[in-house]
């Protein structure tokens, strides 16, 4: 089954919008798990994901207990057909997140989720 590579990140709601806009300029997409189109029960999945991430860090990330779980995916400019994502894509993502270090928590690894399709505008 096709999947999309994503970083799973807890984001401080105070910077969520700014981070999303910054990522868009790099052709990276931010998807709040609670409203992601591939989630049947997004709010529940977001709660469970946040809880798992916090529990895995045994208190080290407790300040993120009310932060927003998001997936960050890679736009078309990073893809070359069926080839794996280039290392440059990974580097841009991790460097960008490092710039928000006080407001994000993540494990430096990619996971897979069902394909997240971006809505397109229809022209008349």
Image (spheres, rainbow, N blue to C red):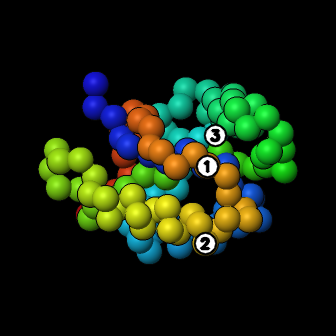
Q: Nearer the viewer, residue 21 or 63?
A: 63
The percent position of residue 117, horizontal first and vertical second, equals: 37, 46
Quadrant holding the C terminus: bottom left
Which residue is depicted at the point 49% across and 52% down?
Answer: 72
x, y percent for residue 94: 49, 61
Q: Is residue 61 above or below residue 27?
A: above
Q: Regarding mark 2 in the picture, which secondary structure is present there?
A: loop
Front position among marks 1 and 3: 1
**Image quadrant in which you'd find residue 6:** top left
Query: CB of mark 2 within 8 Å of CB of mark 3?
Result: no
Cα–Cα gap, marks 2 and 1: 13 Å
Residue 58 visible at all: yes
Where disc 1 sits, the SS reads strand
Residue 113, given in percent of the width and then of the height, sits at 43, 34
Mark toward the start of the polypeptide (1 vs 3) = 3
Among the 4 quarters of the image, the one containing residue 34: top right
Q: Residue 120 vs residue 50: left or right? A: left
Mark positioned earlier in the residue sequence (2 or 1): 2
Front residue of 35/9: it is 9
Q: Quadrant of the N terminus?
A: top left
| Residue bearing mark 2 | 99
Q: Secondary structure at mark 3?
A: helix
| Residue linked to disc 3 | 34
């Amino acid at each position: 089954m096709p999947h999309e590579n994503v970083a799973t990140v807890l984001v401080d709601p105070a910077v969520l919008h700014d981070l999303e806009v910054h990522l868009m300029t790099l052709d990276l997409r931010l998807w709040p798990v609670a409203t992601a189109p591939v989630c049947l029960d997004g709010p529940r999945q977001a709660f469970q994901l946040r809880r798992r991430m916090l529990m895995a860090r045994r208190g080290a990330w407790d300040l993120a207990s009310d932060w927003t779980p998001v997936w960050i995916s890679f736009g078309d400019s990073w893809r070359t057909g069926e080839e794996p994502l280039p290392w440059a894509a990974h580097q841009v993502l991790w460097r960008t997140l490092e710039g928000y270090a006080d407001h994000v928590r993540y494990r430096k690894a990619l996971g897979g989720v069902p394909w997240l399709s971006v809505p397109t505008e229809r022209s008349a």
